[in-house]
Amino acid sequence: MEISLSKNQIGQRISKLRKMKKISQYDLAKCVKISRPSMAQIELGNRSVDVLELQKLSIVLGFSLDDFMSKDFNISHMIDAKPEIFTKKFEERISVPILNIKKFKNVLLYILERCAGKPNVGETVLNKLLYFIDFNYYELYEEHLTGSKYRKLPYGPVPEKLDIIINQMIEKSLLKRIKTEYYAYPQTRFLPLVKADLTELKASEKEVIDKVIEQMSDWSATAITNYSHKDMPWLSSKEGEEINYELAFYRDVPFSVRNYGDEIDEI
């Protein structure tokens, strides 16, 4: 069968059908035997669909291939019960971030160890480093690193409960808060008083942390803030609301850290 529709048209139709059937992107990807990020890229029109994948999608979403590929295809005619394949409830994937305080503290200590001598790394830069570490890791591995939740605030994404955690660490003599100036502007900085316990971090987690530090820890507060404001998770969120980690799969270059084009589609 020759596929004459554009990738955008196919992606839009699949997305609308999936939502009408009330099927999650993860569950649909699982049935088609491709990865969750690949399904996201298909729906965005960034990834092509081969004939075998389209046949699997037709079975799961309950459409005729001839009807689907027709220019006169009417999505509204497809509103019916879910396909039989979904009559049994799938095991829900846990995607809600749950803060791992111990890991968060060690990530914070490790960042500060690596950046303690850099005068630009004040509170603003620290917030953004934590954000990119967490969201880059989630995009790569579809797992939460620290499990911290982030909110969209005017100066960029900010981890929730950061002030509480820092105050606890100061009370336990793990950190020291200092007030200083950087280019005549007031700045809050933190100095580590103990070393991070790296046994709390997986090799993949440390690798992501190191890459973010190497890429961004020399940036000014203004530069890293402006950069974060162009990232899809921040752009797609409403002011003051929690930023959904799933939005990391909709990133484009230069923000995306995952090579979707060469990805091996396995679950």
Image (cartoon, helix red, strand yellow):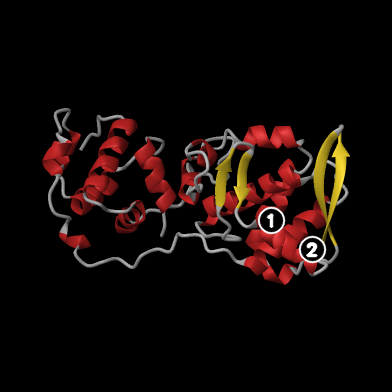
Q: Which residue carries the number 1 mark?
A: 163
- The quadrant of the picture occupied by the C terminus is bottom left
Residue 240 or residue 159, whichever sits in front: 240
Residue at image x 34%, y 51%? 25
Residue 189 or residue 93, whichever sits in front: 189
Q: State whether residue 178 is above or below residue 42.
A: below
Quadrant of residue 253 within the rendered picture: top right
Q: State whether residue 66 is above or below residue 267.
A: above
Residue at image x 66%, y 69%? 102
* Amino acid at pointer 2: Ile
* Amino acid at pointer 1: Asp
- Residue 230 drawn at (x, y percent): 57, 33
Residue 116 or residue 204, whichever sits in front: 116
Q: Residues within 10 Å of mark 1 (few under 14, many from 20)?
A: few
Q: Which residue carries the number 2 mark?
A: 170
* Residue 85 visible from this viewpoint: yes
Residue at image x 51%, y 47%? 243
- Residue 41 drawn at (x, y percent): 41, 41
* Callout 1: SS: helix
